Image (spheres, rainbow, N blue to C red):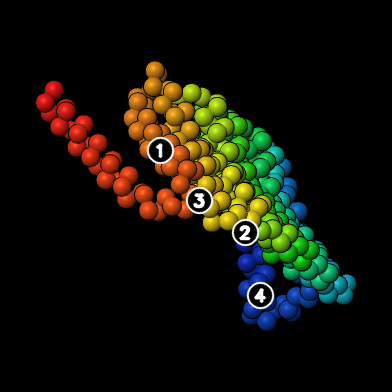
Amino acid sequence: MKNNWISLVWGILLILGGGLFLAQNLGYVEEFSNQVWMMIFAGVSVLFFATYFLLGVQHWGYLFPACIFGGTAITMALGEAGVSSSAVGAPVIIGVGLPFLVAFGLDMRKNWWALIPAFIFGMITMLLFIADIASGEAIGTAVLYSFALPFLVAYLTNTRERKWALIPAYVFAVVGTIPMITTQVSGEVIGAFVMFAVALPFLIVFLWNRKNTWGLIVAFIMATVGMLPLLTTLDTKGETIGAFVMFALALPFWVTFLFSSRNWWAVIPAGIMTSVGVTVFLIGTWNFSDAGLAKLNGVMNLGIAATFFLVWLRRGTHPVDWAKYPAIAFLIFGLITLVFGTSFNVYWPFLLIAAGVLVLLFNLRARHA
């Protein structure tokens, strides 16, 4: 019954409005002034608001014409009052965004999506107020933050089903921070910030579930790359930077191995990069002669041999008996390099020949057996 009365009233009003505008077009009624149009828009807004409340607050779609006509009336009033700033258009933008905010408030779980346009129109409104006084960087940051915030709220209203919303929220927040810091810090710091920001979600993936060891590895790699621009600003030696990179890349593999013995494979990249890192660091710390560098190379080979030996120790629970072969090979190379130094270049072809002979002997022995 209520719907019928509302429909009847709106039907009569539309007929009267159509007749009035027809009379105006035919010249029977003078052109309306701005004040009259302002009153018409305000009256239509009041009627739509009344319709909305009579039908029930769940019919929030009626708020669009109610708020837009009301916002238009206010904008016209501001114009008549002599306001000339960009904020004059704010009431109309608020009128578009407000119904979305009401829809979200009525059912936060079902209408979570309404937050996105609500915050966007809200941010546009804010920009209209600050456009004349704020810098371009501040406006860019504000816009991107406004995109991030509704996704964050969407996640907080249903943390179980909307974990995905954290991704766009985080991306918009990170990208939004960049314009704000461009005028305050150097390009190297911005580059480091971006890489650290990329690394953080991968670290969270690992901390969320320790089985996701890949997340830890990617996080450390991204963070390591992020440190490089910062190190260049400190006039750090190239060898020190190289050693840092090796140690930083080795660390997640060591952690992966220590968290679970099943990750025995992580020892190989961890040990090799640690051995290389130690060698590079020592080269940058002391001035070695050619003989010293050769012996240092031998130490590195011994470190790699120790790496494969550590893998071989897991042979009781994992199929890693093969690790003894590279362990022995690097052990021999390391010892020979330590003994002969730079003269190793003369002897290593004989080692290759000896290795080939041993392979043939083992092959012939296996056939006869």
Image mark count: 4
Taking the view exactly as shown, the residue that stands out farthest to the bottom is 27
Q: Circle 3 is placed at which residue position?
A: 294
Residues under numbered marks 1 and 3 in contact, where contact means CB atoms less than 8 Å apart: no
Quarter of the picture containing the N terminus is top right
Does residue 246 show up? Answer: no
For mark 4, give the secondary structure.
Answer: helix
* Mark seen at residue 238: 2
Q: Which residue is mark 4?
A: 23
Q: Which residue type does callout 4 highlight?
A: Ala
Residue 88 drawn above or below residue 367: below
SS class, disc 2: helix
Give the residue type at disc 2.
Gly
Q: State the CA–CA distance, disc 2 to disc 3.
A: 20 Å
Work out whether mark 4 precedes mark 1 in sequence or the reverse, and give the earlier one: 4
Check disc 3 and give the amino acid type.
Answer: Ala
User: Where does residue 231 sit, x and y in percent of width and height?
Assistant: 68, 56
Q: Calculate the distance from the C-alpha at mark 4 to the C-alpha at mark 1.
A: 106 Å
Q: Residue 308 in the image: state x and y as whole percent.
A: 43, 33
Quadrant placement of the C terminus: top left
Closer to the camera in the image, 281 or 314: 281
Name the residue that disc number 1 marks. 332
Task: Return the disc, 2 or 4, that comes first in the chain's sequence.
Answer: 4
Q: Who is closer to the viewer here, 118 or 364?
A: 364
Q: Earlier in the sequence, mark 1 or mark 3?
A: 3
